Structure formats: structure tokens, C-alpha cells
Image (cartoon, helix red, strand yellow):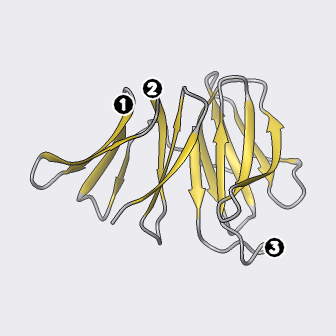
Amino acid sequence: AIAIATRRFVYRPDQEIVISASRDGMVKVWDLQAQEELFSVNAWAIVFAISIDPDEDSFTIRTKQQLIKSWSLRTEQPVTSAQKRPRTIASVTVNEGRHLISGSRKTIKIWDLHAAREVCLLQGHSSLVTAVAVSCDRPLLVSGSEDQTVKIWGVA
């Protein structure tokens, strides 16, 4: 699973965050600009979805077993889960319902929903793409793969 938040955080006003999770249960919080890991936590389960709340300086995960867990981005400690519903699939609709972005085999496809056709194919992963996230305020897409990489894409 992967999520991106480019909105400014309360306690980190100049920082943009990407959060990724792998099958071993490790959840990593990254500084997008520096492309460095800030910290990691162990979810002790496969993570299927991640949701970031910049207003609360927290993130929430949903595990394969349907457990919801949250952590503070400020203290790096667990917090009581809010009533959030993180994304449950690796595809995201963006641009007011005009485009669908889907992760598949080793690629990411961008579909024009109005024209009902593929408009872009992003290649670069060496294994199954399992997660995609799109920035709401910048032309930025982040993907995660079973090849254990996170890739940042500029999209217009």
C-alpha cells in the first residue's frame, strides 16, 4: 500500500510525506523532497490501504485482517483510530472523475474515462504494481511494487 500527502502539515509546514507498506508489515514514512525515510513502524500484518490526515498529523492503515490502526506523524506513536475508510484498491480516480490510474503487472496505466481508452503507460517496476497514490494538488503519482521499490512519477 502507498499514500501521498503534499498538503502542508501542522507541525512540518515545509514537508511532504509519502507512506509505504510492504508484505513484511513494515510501514515507512518518507520525506518526499529529500527521498529519505523519516521513521518506520511495524504493523505486524499485511497492509492493504493507507490514509494520511495532514490536519491531524496522523496516518491510518487497514490490514488484510480488516484491522484499523493509526499513528501520529509527530510522535511516531500509535493513536486511537479515527473513523476513516482508507482506499481498498490500488486504483485511484483523479481529475474530477476524468482519469483512472491503475497498477497492474509491471506497469501503471492512465485511462481517459470519457474517451474509454488508455492514454498513458508508465513502465519502470520489475514486478507487480500493488499500490498507486495521486497528489491532490500537484501533478505527482507514487507507486509501490512487489519489487520492493517506491517510484515517484511526474504526470500532467
Mark 3 secondary-structure assignment = loop
Q: Residues within 10 Å of mark 2 (few under 14, many from 20)?
A: some
Q: Is residue 21 above or below residue 96?
A: above
- Residue annotated with mark 3: 11
**Mark 3 and mark 1: span between their CA atoms?**
36 Å
Circle 2 or circle 3, nearest the eye: 2
Q: Are marks 1 and 2 in contact (CB under 8 Å)?
A: yes
- Quarter of the image holding residue 41? top right
Question: x%, y% of residue 97?
Answer: 27, 58
Q: Residues within 10 Å of mark 1 (few under 14, many from 20)?
A: some
Residue type, mark 1 in image = Ser
Q: Earlier in the sequence, mark 2 or mark 3?
A: 3
Residue that mark 2 sits on:
128
Residue 61 lies left or right of residue 98; in this view the side is right
Outermost residue on the left side: it is 115
**Residue 44: image location, x then y, percent:** 78, 25
Q: Is residue 12 left or right of residue 76?
A: left
Q: Residue at x 65, y 30 (%)?
A: 22
Q: Position of residue 145 (x, y in %)?
A: 52, 32
